[in-house]
Image: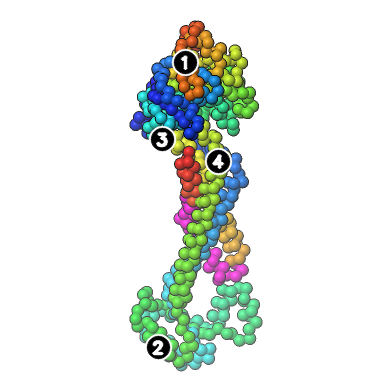
Amino acid sequence: MIHFYHVTKRFDRYSTALHDLTFQIEKGEFVFLTGPSGAGKSTLLKLILRQMTPTEGQVVVNGRNLNTIRRSALPFFRREIGMVFQDFKLIERMTVFENLSFILTVLNVAPREHKRKAYAALRAVDLHHRMNSYPLQLSGGEQQRVAIARALINDPLVLIADEPTGNLDPDMSQDIVRIFNDANLRGSTVLLATHDRDLIRESGRRVITLEHGRISDEKISVGERAPARSDNVFGLAQ
Amino acid sequence: MARDFNTQGRHEPNVPSNTITYFLKEALRRTWASKRTSFVAVAMIAISLFVLGCFLLLSENLQRAVERWQGHSRVTVYLNSEITPDEQRGVDAFLASHKELASRRFVTKQQALARFRSYFTNLAEVAGNLEENPFPPSYEIELQPGIAQSAGFEALMTGVRRLAGVDQVQFDWEWTRRLRRIIEMLNIIGVAAGGVLAMAAAFTIANVIRLTMMLYHEEIEIMRLVGATERMIRGPFLIEGLLQGTIGGIVAVAVLAAGFFAGQRTLAPSSSLLWGFLFGCFLPWQKIVALILGGTIAGWFGSWLSVHERTEEA
């Protein structure tokens, strides 16, 4: 599903974020991406979303080479990728509901469906009671959960999350990982970048560790294997 | 189950109706959110179209006046005030002998004075105070169509001029020819001035949209990242410019109409002839629609300029 072939990303002569990375993530996999700050995690995720292009090498997502993708095809590519941004990227002038509804408008979902889908997505992150609040009226953790709900609302083919539990307490973090697990069980390929070693430790998932822009370790974490499928909280998987 | 996707060969579909609703809602919301800058843009469009409208209105009314005069091409033969009955009979016989002159009407001194009083009501008192009637008797001659352009006409008029008792011969179409030239000039000046102002207004709208886009820079970035097409991003801005231009056009026509009908009501009855010509009729609906459409196009062009410039940068 996601293939990196000898990918290097250089910002300038003295600053190289990624060095000759080669790895692949299969369809339906759930992979943790970890490493210290500045290791290149966010850059790697940005390459997958085609927010930037590699200096060298090729990035291929679902058979699509992102180096050569046409500009006009880019929006359709991105619609199939759910991204939880580190800085949430919520539209401040829109309510929580409108932030989600906007995505559904982009996806040409009929307006009569918006409320139901938005409610289901927000209920999954336990924020259905804040539908009419504005992002700035929410705490950091709540904003992060709205961003997660937005990424999941379309039942994406690939789900990418950049530190999605960074502002959450341990219990809520576990709940969020459960939501990602559900998405994975519905068929989404998940790539989750995190610092949180506790979250990774017992997941039983594949972990890619980055250091100084290079893969320093790649293993399956110990502990439970992938969890059993829980209820389809979104009701979107028909 | 998450869907498979293949972006190869996919094209942007037609904009669905809910997207058009979104464009309109967003455009209206943004116009309202930046009221002051939107007001400047609308005012600029309105002013430029108002100026153009004034020229169009003036030329429209002059054109109508010319057409009315030209509808019956006329020669006026002014006679000496002290013309003898024999001399007048001689003039009348000469005029009657030429078939090119379709009809003639003798206007006495008294009739000329009465006509002056009815045309220039505010000068009627002045005319009443005169000891002697200053208006000469005259013949008003209607011409056969096309005769004024014929080769022998000038000679015929020279013959009339030489008749005993004839003081002056006046061709109306010399005036109409001059007026036509003035109308042409007015149209050129109007279109040039209106065009320059409309361009300035379009650039004002372009700047307003540019400012709005800078204001919504982050939002645009988010829209791109979640898969909004360029059409979806640009749409509300284009509609915003289009709305501003259309509102400007409507405001220009409304102000022009209000000014015209107010002027017609207050000025025209008191001093009939001049104002009667200038306030004869308002613009025909085709020109009204053209003015409003001009605003729409200027608005759309302005927003198109900035939207393309900004999205090319992205």
Query: In what element is the residue under mark 3?
Result: helix
Q: Report which residue position mark 1 lands on.
A: A217
Point out the frontmost of discs 3 and 2.
Answer: 3
Residue A202 spot, x, y in % from top left: 52, 9
Tag 3: amino acid:
Arg
The relative height of residue A132 versus residue B51 in the rendered view (above or below) is above
Left or right: residue A164 versus residue B90 is: right
Q: Residue at x 54, y 80 (%)?
A: B112
Q: Residue at x 47, y 54 (%)?
A: B290
Q: Report which residue position mark 3 lands on.
A: A71
Q: Report which residue position mark 2 lands on.
A: B159
Tag 4: amino acid:
Met
Q: Residue at x 48, y 61 (%)?
A: B192
Q: Which residues are magenta?
A: B269-297
Q: Earlier in the sequence, mark 4 or mark 2?
A: 2
Query: In what element is the residue under mark 4?
Result: helix
User: Disc 3 and disc 1: Cα gap in Å?
Assistant: 35 Å
Question: Is the residue under label 3 in contact with that under label 4 (CB below 8 Å)?
Answer: no
Is the residue marked by circle 3 packed among few (<14), some (14-19), or many (20+) residues within 10 Å?
A: few
Query: In what element is the residue under mark 2?
Result: helix
Q: How does the figure colour the protein chain or chains?
A: rainbow
Nearer to the camera, A153 or A147: A147
Question: Is the residue under label 2 in contact with that under label 3 (CB below 8 Å)?
Answer: no
Nearer to the camera, B308 or A117: B308
The relative height of residue A178 versus residue A111 in the rendered view (above or below) is above
